[in-house]
């Protein structure tokens, strides 16, 4: 059972994917964390993240290891726990530029397919290009959406209002535009993905909806 969950920033991919994996006894992979990890390494090592040639040249250097336990997602870079530093504003601002570099994507896709091969019990993989490029034969493909307003309000709430909803909304839209317009495997809905608009749904409702879709596929109903 391979479940691909794609969608723009802040639509609920991580929260939903972790919960679905936990409920169904599947592993879980956050591919955004991998792109954030390589971006953090580039920034920490003085690579100009706006220079695609420099990024491509260094893309093979860091060792990135992702855990797949939905109860304790973990990521290390060269053996160092990167869970917190990959969530900084500096990394968020740079990650779209780094993830647009084809050599970076080739490297990450190798890691992602290896994680799937290492999960015989099945896995939920979330990202931007999982259903279209990384795992085109996934058993179930979901494309989550939500209005920019709902996504910004959710994210701003997470930050206890430290960043305004308007600024958060502008940042989400900037990242979605960059991620959707890059040449190599842009953010896109696979033709055979089920689109779930979460704007008016609670997280519990979204989780139930996807668990039902997976179970229907499992039983062939
Ligand atoms: N249906 C929902 N209703 C209300 N809040 C939600 C819903 N889904 C997710 N959230 C909340 O929205 C925030 C963003 O969710 P999450 O991190 O799962 O999104 P994401 O798509 O993985 O984001 P990103 O692409 O930026 O990593 C979290 O605070 C989460 O708890
Ligand atoms: N499959 C993926 C996953 C993520 N990215 C890039 C684009 C995102 O802006 C960034 C961070 O992802 P997030 O942690 O917000 O889910 O990583 C990608 O290009 N492809």
Image (cartoon, rainbow, N blue to C red):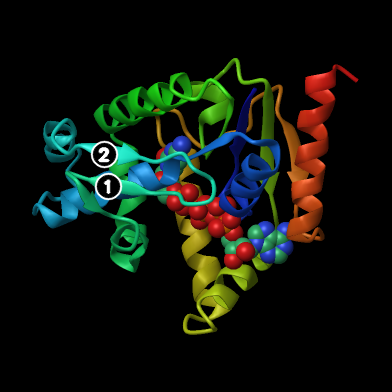
- Residue 82 lies left or right of residue 147; in this view the side is left
Q: Residues within 10 Å of mark 2 (few under 14, many from 20)?
A: many
User: Residue 76 bears which disc, if any?
Assistant: 1
Q: Residue at x 46, y 39 (%)?
A: 68
Nearer to the camera, 101 or 160: 160
Quadrant of residue 109 in the image?
Answer: top left
Is residue 11 among the parts visible in the rendering? yes
Say if disc 1 is inside 8 Å of ligand 2: no
Quarter the N terminus occupies: top right
Residue at x 28%, y 64% (from the top left corner): 90
Answer yes or no: do the residues labelled 1 and 2 have beta carbons within 8 Å? yes
Q: Residue at x 67, y 38 (%)?
A: 143
* Residue 49 is at least partly visible in this image: no
Horizontal and vertical percent position of residue 141: 67, 29
**Is residue 161 positioned above or below 93 on the image?**
below
Q: Quadrant of residue 126?
A: top right
Q: Position of residue 25 (x, y in %)?
A: 64, 36
* Circle 1: element type: strand
Q: Secondary structure at mark 2?
A: strand
Q: Which mark is residue 64?
A: 2
Pointer 1: residues within 10 angstroms few (<14), some, or many (20+)? some
């Amino acid at each position: 059972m391979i479940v691909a969950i794609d969608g723009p920033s802040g639509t609920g991919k991580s929260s939903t994917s972790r919960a679905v994996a936990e409920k169904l006894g599947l592993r879980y992979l956050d591919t955004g964390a991998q792109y954030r990890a390589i971006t953090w390494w580039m920034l920490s090592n003085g690579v100009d993240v706006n220079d695609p040639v420099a990024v491509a040249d260094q893309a093979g250097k860091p060792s990135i290891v992702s855990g797949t336990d939905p109860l304790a997602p973990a990521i290390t870079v060269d053996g160092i726990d990167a869970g917190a530093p990959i969530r900084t504003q500096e990394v968020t601002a740079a990650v779209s530029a780094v993830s647009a570099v084809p050599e970076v994507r080739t490297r990450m896709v190798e890691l992602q397919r290896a994680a799937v091969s290492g999960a015989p019990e099945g896995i939920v993989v979330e990202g931007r290009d999982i259903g279209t490029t990384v795992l085109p034969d996934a058993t179930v493909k979901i494309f989550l959406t939500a209005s920019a307003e709902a996504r910004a309000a959710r994210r701003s709430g997470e930050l206890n209002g430290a960043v305004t909803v308007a600024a958060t909304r502008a940042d989400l839209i900037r990242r979605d535009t960059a991620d959707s317009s890059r040449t190599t495997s842009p953010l896109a809905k696979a033709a055979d993905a089920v689109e779930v608009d979460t704007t008016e749904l609670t997280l519990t409702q979204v989780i139930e909806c996807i668990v039902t879709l997976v179970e229907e596929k499992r039983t062939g109903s």
